[in-house]
Amino acid sequence: MKETLGFIGLGIMGKPMAKNLINAGYKLIVLDVNPGPVKELVEMGAVAASTPAGIAGSVSKIITMLPDGPEVEEVVLGAGGIIENAGLNTALIDMSSISPTVTHKIAASLKEKEAQALDAPVSGGEPGAIKGELAIMVGGPETLFNEMKPVFDVLGKSAVLVGDTGAGQTTKLVNQILVGIHIEAMGEAFLLASKAGVDCMKVFQAIKGGLAGSNVLNAKVPLLLDRNFKPGFKIRLHQKDLKNALEASETLGLDLKVTRIVQEMIGALVDRGNGDDDHGGIVQELEYRNKTEIM
Ligand code: NAD
């Protein structure tokens, strides 16, 4: 029989991931501040917990899928947090995308209790979470990675141990720089096509098999041309990831110029009230500044 896992954070990503684990035969103890998804999971056989410490008192492996570092810190190190019942067998598998600095702080605090941690953020979005086809980028001890591999195989189509603690989160920052700049490039390219009066869908079909074709374009161009910016991955979460990327780059003495420009465009869009749109909607800032909509 498969072991019981803790699962904290049942949002756009966490809920389908938790459902896939139940469907694969895992028992889950779940927690979210929002009662709706907890109820859905309980109806599928999960047990609801009232505190992260309660989960740590019952199971050894706990997955978190929370918005950002402050939420992960609260759940692990705060009052009623995992740390209160953490011990030799406890393992935190944080699949949220957070700053590598926070990851190091949390892993160090758990180590004082002889507990272990993996940072295991993902790419693939809500569709990847639903289909169990996420790309999982992992940092931490190899033995724990090997123990968790069967769980990762349920949640994703690939899980790569990149390096020690924090390496998974650094890899996620790499991913988010590439995706953010790519969406901005998509906006500039299709704004040009649209303004020139060329059919954007035909442009997409013409280029998608060539060097410029990409997963980003395949996922986002059809939604853009439908004006469908329903999340998906919220712009404010991408803003959080680029903030973490820029902070990490400053610590390393680097200047990531284009990332900074994209982050400034995202900031303006969020300030105008579009933070909850899908990140494919980052192009709206470019449209706003050029007073032209891509059609
Ligand atoms: P979300 O906002 O939909 O879900 C977060 C969940 O955490 C919510 O249900 C919220 O109620 C819960 N939560 C917040 N604070 C809590 C607390 N203290 N205790 C318990 N529950 C709490 O976010 P999401 O889109 O599912 O993203 C989760 C993480 O995955 C983020 O770090 C995000 O950057 C990353 N991610 C998201 C996507 C995507 O496409 N949505 C893709 C890859 C990675």
Image (spheres, helix red, strand yellow):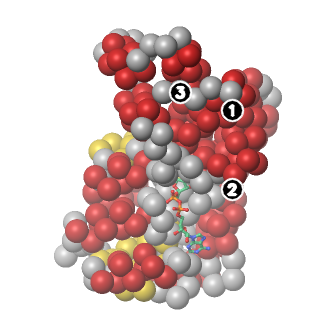
* Image height of 238 relative to 87, above or below: above
Residue at the extreme left of the image, as rendered: 1
Residue 256 placement (x, y as % from top left): 72, 26
Residue 284 appearing in the image: yes
* Image height of 269 relative to 262, above or below: below
Contact flag, marks 3 and 1 (Cβ < 8 Å):
no
Residue denoted by label 1: 288
Q: Residues within 10 Å of mark 1 (few under 14, many from 20)?
A: few
Residue 99 placement (x, y as % from top left): 66, 50
Q: Tell me the kind of residue under disc 2.
A: Val
Residue denoted by label 3: 294
For marks 1 and 2 on the same chain, the one whose residue lies earlier in the sequence = 2
Q: How crowded is mark 3: few (under 14 residues within 10 Å), some or many (20 or more)?
A: many
Residue denoted by label 2: 102
Residue 116 placement (x, y as % from top left): 53, 64
Residue 124 placement (x, y as % from top left): 40, 44
Which SS class for mark 2?
helix
